[in-house]
Amino acid sequence: MAKFYHKITPRLQKFIEQQKIFFVATAPTEGRINLSPKGMDSFRVLSENRVAWLNVTGSGNETAAHLLENERITIMMCSFEGAPNILRLYGKGKEIKEGDANWNELIQMFPETPGTRQIFDINIESAQTSCGMSIPFFDYKGEREELNDWAASKGKEGIKEYWTEKNQTSIDGLPTKILE
């Protein structure tokens, strides 16, 4: 049975901190919905109504474009071991880039990661749990290093060139403002 919360409770925070993968969903007013899996040590609970997620350079920058347009975001986590559980965090997010006022405060909460692109600062409006009894068991075997290796080989300047080529607009043509 689904249950709604107005904040991240200590029990929910403990669940969040145990997860190795989470999913991010955003959507423009018109256009494609984006749903992406995320991993690495990149998610932090900052308070009962605020989380942050360190985003690294990838093939697109949909989340930034969508949040610039309407701020809506949903984070989902599922239990792949232990008791079944699905957690959704509903909120409003904003992008924080290097040089922005909150950058130094937030970046120190995460490990140094090659290809770091931005941090998404999300105010949680509600959380929802549901049973998750149909979610299969999976074993965590470790992190993939290919993206970190790729980003390290590119270097900071190479990453900025990649942003220029691949990350300035969403797949629907919305601006991401990654270079501003």
Image (cartoon, helix red, strand yellow):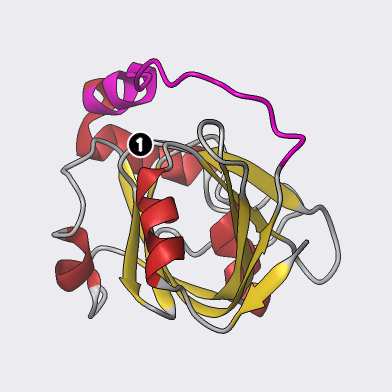
Which residue lies under the disc numbered 1?
40
Q: Is residue 11 visible?
A: yes
Quadrant placement of the N terminus: bottom right
Q: Is the residue marked by circle 1 packed among few (<14), some (14-19), or many (20+) residues within 10 Å?
A: some
Relative to the observer, which residue lies in front, 96 or 20? 20
Image point 75% across, 65% down: which residue? 2
Residue under the image location 23 percent in, 39 percent down: 113
Residue at the location (33% across, 21% down)? 150
Main secondary structure of the magenta stretch? loop
**In magenta stretch: residue 149:** yes
Residue 120 in sight in this render:
no
The vertical placement of 145 against 24, above or below, is above
Using the image as rendered, state which of residue 174 and residue 90 is in the foreground: 90
Magenta segment: 133-152
Along the line of sight, which residue is nearer the eye, 99 or 2?
Answer: 2
Quarter of the image with the C terminus in it: bottom left
- Front residue of 155/85: it is 85
Queried whether the magenta region covers residue 64, the answer comes back as: no
Amino acid type of the residue that numbered disc 1 sits on in the rendered structure: Met
Q: Quadrant of residue 53?
A: bottom left
**At which x and y percent is residue 179?**
40, 59
Query: In the image, 34: left or right of 139?
Result: right
Q: Where does residue 148 sit, x and y in percent of width and height?
A: 30, 26
